[in-house]
Image (cartoon, helix red, strand yellow):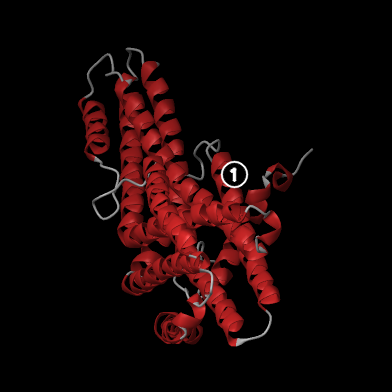
């Protein structure tokens, strides 16, 4: 006979370890606000110390180090190969977008500290408790999404570290190589800083998708019970019970809406920065591949360039799965609306049950999925648009490259 622990999935047995890892990962980069599932309250002195460390670390990234790299800007882009210099400029623009996203992330974390820590995190914990007795089938896709995200992020971290070591090994001695290695490390830290909040947003949206699916299954089960109603002395009693359950589901639906809307409101500018970073990363990736092919010899291609191309591909996949979650949320809301259309009125009119059906229908009808800054929907179409835009800019870079090739 199997024990309850043996029936649990790997994620269920080690879920809190993953969350603790993510919290420690965030603390390293000064983001004490990110605590996926708070398990114990921090002492006031420790919390104040961590918040102070977060501000100092952010100021180092935003104020001190940019001054150092601006002072050495010519050293970073100095090369006799004009085409390679163009690649340096594109990479520098990529880091500049990450830098802007770090500023936005720092401001958002500071302004929305209580909303993130006490709002989204606690609201998600409350919904997790509310749905603990709901159908568990939607938990499996949620776990797979978390596995994939966890493995992808750690793989990208290892790729970047390998690229930094390779650049350090090939650069040799000299101020030029040292500054470029320092810049690569700085870009790596910027990426990790923004990725912490992107992972948190991904986790919240993944949870929202899981709750919508569980909500839809509960709604379908309630509809089946309504179809089984038969005239009789207990009909009104059953209608009252179904009305209570429908009212509870409507409250949960509103809480899920609020969680998704609040998460988007706090992270919308950071997500815009992520989209811009993906655009520049795609542009860098396209141009790097062109730069490799233009040399006509794979032996001449430096290892850091190959690592950078693999990283940019992983970055694009990372952005794609973030938008894929929101695409699935939109499809699930359509499925919930379809379930509501299949609701039938009881054979003997019950005013309260009919009113609850109407209220839930209006709740779903009036809800509009949040948009990024009121301009864009975060779905797969946005990722395709980014890829097409990057390719258009890539053509412009190729024209510059051909011009520099003729000039040299």
Q: Position of residue 159 (x, y in %)?
A: 64, 62
Q: Which residue is mark 1?
A: 144
Can residue 43 be seen at all in this image of the molecule?
no
* Residue at screen point 59% across, 77% down: 181
Residue 63 occupies quadrant: bottom left
Q: Farthest residue in the right direction?
A: 1
Q: Give the number of marks.
A: 1
Q: Is residue 373 left or right of residue 85?
A: left
Residue 346 occupies quadrant: top left
Closer to us: 186 or 343: 186
**Mark 1 surroundings: few (<14), some (14-19) or many (≥20) residues within 10 A:** few
Q: Would you place residue 80 above or below residue 277 in this image?
A: below
Closer to us: 195 or 98: 98
Q: Is residue 158 left or right of residue 279?
A: right
Closer to us: 393 or 360: 393
* Residue at screen point 41% across, 58% down: 400
Closer to us: 115 or 233: 115
Q: Would you place residue 137 above or below residue 236 in this image?
A: below
For the N terminus, the quadrant is top right
* Residue at screen point 22% across, 34% down: 362
Q: Position of residue 185 (x, y in %)?
A: 57, 75
Q: Position of residue 226 (x, y in %)?
A: 36, 21
Q: Position of residue 47 (x, y in %)?
A: 47, 81
Can residue 212 be seen at all in this image of the molecule?
yes
Label 1 secondary element: helix
Q: Is residue 16 left or right of residue 110?
A: right
């Amino acid at each position: 006979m199997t024990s309850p622990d043996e029936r649990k999935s790997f994620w269920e047995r080690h879920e809190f370890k993953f969350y603790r890892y993510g919290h420690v990962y965030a603390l390293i980069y000064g983001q004490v606000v990110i605590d996926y599932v708070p398990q114990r309250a921090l002492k006031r002195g420790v919390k104040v110390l961590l918040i102070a460390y977060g501000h100092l670390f952010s100021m180092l990234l935003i104020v001190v180090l940019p001054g150092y790299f601006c002072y050495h800007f010519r050293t970073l882009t100095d090369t006799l190969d004009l085409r390679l210099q163009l690649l340096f400029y594109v990479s520098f623009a990529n880091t500049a977008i990450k830098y802007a996203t770090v500023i936005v992330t720092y401001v958002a974390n500071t302004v929305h500290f209580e909303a993130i820590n006490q709002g989204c995190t606690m609201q998600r914990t409350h919904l997790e408790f509310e749905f603990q007795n709901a159908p568990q089938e939607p938990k499996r896709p949620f776990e797979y999404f978390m596995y994939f995200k966890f493995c992808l992020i750690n793989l990208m971290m290892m790729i970047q570290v390998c690229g930094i070591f390779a650049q350090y090994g090939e650069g040799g001695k000299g101020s030029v190589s040292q500054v470029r290695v320092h810049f690569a490390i700085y870009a790596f830290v910027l990426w990790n800083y923004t990725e912490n909040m992107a992972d948190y947003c991904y986790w919240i949206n993944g949870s929202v998708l899981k709750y919508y699916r569980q909500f839809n299954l509960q709604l379908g089960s309630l509809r089946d019970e309504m179809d089984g109603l038969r005239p009789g002395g207990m009909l009104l009693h059953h209608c009252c019970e179904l009305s209570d359950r429908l009212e509870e589901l409507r409250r949960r639906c509103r809480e899920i809406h609020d969680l998704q809307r609040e998460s988007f409101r706090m992270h919308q500018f950071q997500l815009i920065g992520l989209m811009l970073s993906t655009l520049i990363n795609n542009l860098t990736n396209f141009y790097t591949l062109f730069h490799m092919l233009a040399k006509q010899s794979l032996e001449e291609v430096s290892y850091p360039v190959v690592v950078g191309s693999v990283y940019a591909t992983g970055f694009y996949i990372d952005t794609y799965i973030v938008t894929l979650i929101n695409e699935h949320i939109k499809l699930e809301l359509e499925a919930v609306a379809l379930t509501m259309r299949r609701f039938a009125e009881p054979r003997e009119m019950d005013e309260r049950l009919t009113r609850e059906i109407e209220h839930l229908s209006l709740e779903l009808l009036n809800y509009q999925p949040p948009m990024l800054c009121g301009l864009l929907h975060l779905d797969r179409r946005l990722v395709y648009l980014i890829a097409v835009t990057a390719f258009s800019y890539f053509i412009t870079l190729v024209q510059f490259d051909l011009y520099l090739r003729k000039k040299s």
